Image: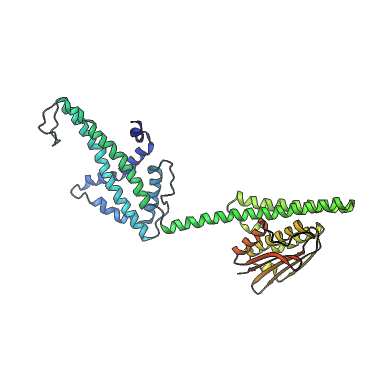
């Protein structure tokens, strides 16, 4: 019994009732103007529903009054842009008015019938109820009183549920809106992956340089070299903190421009950091790096950073050859270092190298990493357009 009466304790039962009653206000006003033409309000809904902004209003009303949480993505709250959506809005307005008419009958007429049945049981036979006209008063009419009340309950709850289901069908997002929502979600996921790569590349590079410098200083036993190593660790740590602040700034400010991220124009900072760790870096930068488009330059910087980090982490202080070339509408990057003794030439599969491939693929380019004639080589080629 409690389960049967549970809908009467839900707020949505009554907000849905209010939602269906709202169109009846217009009908009631019209009945005072010209009751001989009750179909005029339904006809007037056709041009109203074709107004793009009406779909927004109906979607907001449906979210607030037809759902329990007050916000349901199943309802579109954007103006109609296609004629199909406008026609769906018109159909919804007509359906809403029809459901409202039935709701008014259920909420007004059925309780009156229950009251009249109770009056007949007490000896007062109503004259305006054809079924009871001429009936003989009797107490057993009281047994029929619950019937119109049960019908009232069923109609009120059922019509509200029907209104919510039909609203989701007619006011739901169109195919274009669903595609736009999917694209937005995809952009969010790509942004999360980009931030994860930013943190991995920046912090990983800084920690790798710090570990290599600390190990070299301890092995050297030279106070002057130790001072230089500590200076390099300090400088690399400051640069990592700056990169971390940039990445966290993206999280704090959704509209923060990505132009604050480092580009290939700042590649010297990476090269000096690698040299300070004890590695011999032979760098050759050719072509107008400053003319490389922003997205390509930023991703190229990160690819170079990860390649240097990979060399320092797995090979130590070994000679590293860096080639960056801008020519023929393409950006080419190459980082080579000798394989350390005892290190397997099998391909290394880590998140850093995977990030290099992902960055290149996102820009329509390609990347490769692996052993090449006794060296470990990382190559990337990115289109400038």
Closer-to-camera residue (339/219): 339
- The answer to which image quadrant residue 18 occupies is top left
Report the residue that reaches farthest toward the left.
Answer: 134
Quadrant of the snapshot with the N terminus: top left
How many marks are shown on the rendered structure? 0
Residue 78 pos. (x, y %): 42, 53
Return the x and y of residue 289 as percentages of the image width and height.
Answer: 70, 68
Residue 364: image location, x then y, percent: 59, 67
Name the residue located 28 percent from the left edge and 40 percent from the top edge.
Answer: 155
Q: In this rendering, would 245 be left or right of 87?
A: right
> Which residue is nearer to you in this view: 247 or 183?
183
Residue at 14% across, 31% down: 126
Tell me the residue at 22%/47% (across/down): 33
Classify 252 as above or below 116. below
Which quadrant is home to the C terminus? bottom right
The image's colouring method is: rainbow
Reply above or below: 272 against 162: below
Q: Is residue 33 left or right of residue 259?
A: left
Drawn side of residue 158 relative to residue 262, left or right: left
Q: Position of residue 338 (x, y in %)?
A: 78, 64
């Amino acid at each position: 019994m409690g389960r049967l009466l549970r809908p009467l304790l839900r707020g949505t039962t009554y907000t849905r009732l209010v939602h269906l009653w709202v169109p009846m206000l217009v009908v009631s006003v019209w009945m005072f103007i010209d009751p001989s033409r009750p179909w005029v309000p339904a006809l007037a809904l056709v041009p109203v529903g074709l107004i793009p902004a009406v779909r927004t209003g109906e979607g907001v009303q449906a979210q607030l009054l037809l759902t329990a949480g007050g916000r349901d993505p199943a309802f579109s709250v954007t103006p109609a842009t296609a004629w199909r959506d406008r026609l769906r809005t018109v159909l919804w307005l007509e359906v809403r008015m029809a459901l409202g008419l039935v709701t008014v009958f259920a909420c007004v007429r059925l309780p009156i019938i229950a009251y009249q049945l109770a009056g007949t049981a007490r000896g007062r036979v109503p004259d305006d109820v054809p079924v009871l006209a001429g009936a003989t008063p009797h107490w057993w009419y009281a047994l029929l009183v619950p019937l119109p009340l049960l019908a009232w309950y069923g109609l009120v709850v059922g019509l509200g549920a029907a209104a919510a289901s039909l609203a989701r069908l007619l006011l739901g997002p169109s195919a274009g809106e669903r595609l736009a929502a999917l694209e937005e979600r995809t952009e969010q996921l790509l942004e999360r992956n980009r931030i994860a790569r930013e943190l991995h590349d920046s912090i990983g590079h800084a920690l790798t340089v710090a570990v290599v410098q600390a190990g070299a200083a301890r092995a050297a036993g030279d106070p002057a070299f130790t001072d230089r190593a500590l200076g390099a660790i300090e400088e690399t740590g400051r640069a990592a903190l700056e990169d971390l602040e940039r990445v966290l700034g993206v999280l704090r400010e959704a509209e923060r421009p990505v132009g604050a991220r480092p580009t290939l124009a700042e590649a010297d900072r990476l090269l000096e950091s690698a040299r300070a760790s004890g590695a011999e870096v032979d760098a050759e930068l050719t072509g107008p790096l400053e003319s490389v488009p922003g997205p390509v330059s930023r991703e190229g910087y990160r690819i170079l950073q990860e390649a240097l980090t990979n060399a320092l982490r797995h090979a130590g202080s070994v000679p590293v050859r860096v080639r960056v070339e801008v020519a023929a509408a393409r950006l080419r990057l190459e980082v080579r270092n000798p394989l350390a003794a005892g290190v397997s030439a099998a391909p290394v599969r880590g998140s850093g190298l995977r990030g290099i491939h992902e960055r290149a693929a996102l820009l329509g380019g390609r990347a490769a990493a692996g052993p090449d004639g006794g060296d470990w080589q990382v190559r990337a080629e990115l289109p400038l357009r």
